[in-house]
Image (cartoon, rainbow, N blue to C red):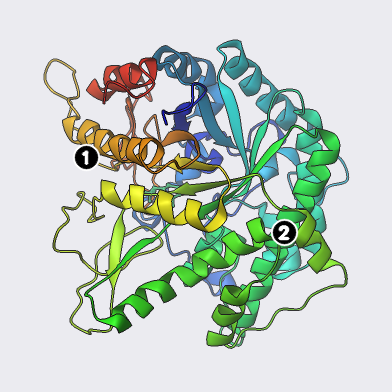
Amino acid sequence: MKLRDDFLWGGATAANQYEGAYLEDGKGLTINDVELGAEHGKKRLIHQTVQANNYYPSHEAVDFYHRYEEDIALFAEMGFKSLRISISWARIFPNGDDLEPNERGLAFYDRVFDELLSYGIEPIVTLHHFELPLNLVEKYGAWRNRKLVDLAVRYAQTVMERYKDKVKYWITFNEINALFISSQPWHMAGIIYQEDENRMNTMFQAAHHQLVASAKTVIEGKKINPSFKFGCMLLYPCTYAATCHPNDQIKAREKMLATYYFGDVHIRGKYTNNCLAYTESLNGTIDFEPGDAALLAQGTVDYLSFSYYFSAIEGISEEIEMAEGNLSSGGKNPFLETTEWGWQIDPVGLRNSLNSLYDRYQIPLFIVENGMGALDTIEKDGTINDDYRIDYLAQHIKALKDAVEQDHVDLLGYTVWGPIDIISAGTGEMRKRYGFIYVDKDDDGHGSLNRSKKKSFEWFKKVIATNGESV
Ligand code: BGP
């Protein structure tokens, strides 16, 4: 089997890391735009580097809001078939619960989609990429509150109706399983746990609300346009047993429970034995409303999208050294090299992940994030020779080709994370770059924001032009 002729090569971004213009055209504040300071008795966990300089990454980011034409022209020059972006809920409903949507916010995404479509680039739209209008945190306690389900569905209906002839591929929640992986799920659900709170119950209830909102979004979306394709999105923490000790295998399997929890509900339409085992292991409880089970059963997704950056090991030994990672992490694998940020580079793990997911769910897969965050150096002649990035991506593309050609995995596409340098979600840094396109900006927020091509630009262009054959 070969890669599909319509394989969706492209790039993936998120509004708060890319757009900037954080108060423009009526947009409301989001959880990314503020630091919750002492008056709330809470602390943000991320973006600390830049907060120290009193500079918030989401405020300007790399200004896609005003430079989308230039950026999309560059993506088109590379031959992109698709671009994954997210819509910022607060551009559409500035407070999340406003009576009417904000026309200027809606018009911005119209312009972006029209520009993409004029080059034949398929938009892939994430409705919730680690973003929430701040008002929903302050007024309702964010995703703790069932009220968020209806508000999120109304937001989704508004944009699905508006863009029904422009967007076909939707993703409901980015890395929804990160809610279980992160100890303070501020980004995923607007939640900072309070001391007197039963964290487990809050976590499971917030997850249930997001899963119900996702199912309702799918159901309502299919009414608006039956040809819409909906995906769930998982952070895939590829995990190996540390040794052949049988209990290491159990440990490695347990590591995956939190991820399959969401995959199962999104795809199998119910809380499976895996979900129940996980909930019980953490003494969690979930309040259901009548009709929830039917909604979950009906609102299943059409494809499974996921992010893949690294793998890790798990085992019973206390000697296992920990490796770095984004939200997920695990043990160090002596067979693997790491990136400058300590993420273990494992292209074969991508082939393993594709097989595990396809075996389990048997629906089309979509790799919507993969890439290498690295420090780039500008040479005297202005060139940026990012051979390390080319090497990382080439190895991962080879691995996905093996999964399709030899293992017959059904794969819709591959969108590289941050095809243009954007703000890092994990650290708030600018110097952690993923792009084929360099953006002149540093960690203090200084720079012209000018765009220039790296060596990987021409390389990826050829990959797309040959539908992966050049790798
Ligand atoms: C994922 C997120 C992205 C993204 C990526 C890379 O977890 O979905 O938003 O940024 O990781 O992580 P980082 O930016 O921390 O390098």
- Judge by depth and name the residue closer to the eye, 366 or 140: 366
Say if mark 1 contacts mark 2, CB within 8 Å.
no
Q: Marks 1 and 2: which is nearer the front?
A: 1
Q: Residue at x 68, y 73 (%)?
A: 205
Residue 239 image offset from top left, x and y in percent: 34, 64
Q: Distance between the residues labelled 1 and 2?
A: 36 Å
Is residue 314 something one can see in this rendering?
yes
Tell me which label, 1 or 2, sits earlier in the chain.
2
Tag 1: residue type? Leu
Residue 386 image offset from top left, x and y in percent: 20, 29
Q: Is residue 306 left or right of residue 200?
A: left
Check disc 1 and report the residue beneath it: 375
Q: What element carries label 2?
A: helix
Tag 2: residue type? Leu
Check disc 2 and report the residue beneath it: 136
Q: Is residue 220 above or below residue 442?
A: below
Q: Which mark is residue 320?
A: none
- Judge by depth and name the residue closer to the eye, 403 or 221: 403
Q: Which residue is drawn at 42% across and 49% down?
A: 354
Q: Is residue 422 above or below residue 141?
A: above
The answer as to whether callout 1 falls within 8 Å of ligand 1 is no
Q: Which residue is drawn at 74% across and 39% down?
A: 92
Q: Please identify the quarter of the rendering in which residue 85 is found.
A: top right
Q: Which quadrant does the C terminus fall into?
A: top left
Q: What element carries label 1?
A: loop
Q: Is residue 257 left or right of residue 378?
A: right
Q: How crowded is mark 2: few (under 14 residues within 10 Å), some or many (20 or more)?
A: many
Is residue 36 something one can see in this rendering?
no
Q: Which quadrant does the N terminus fall into?
A: top left
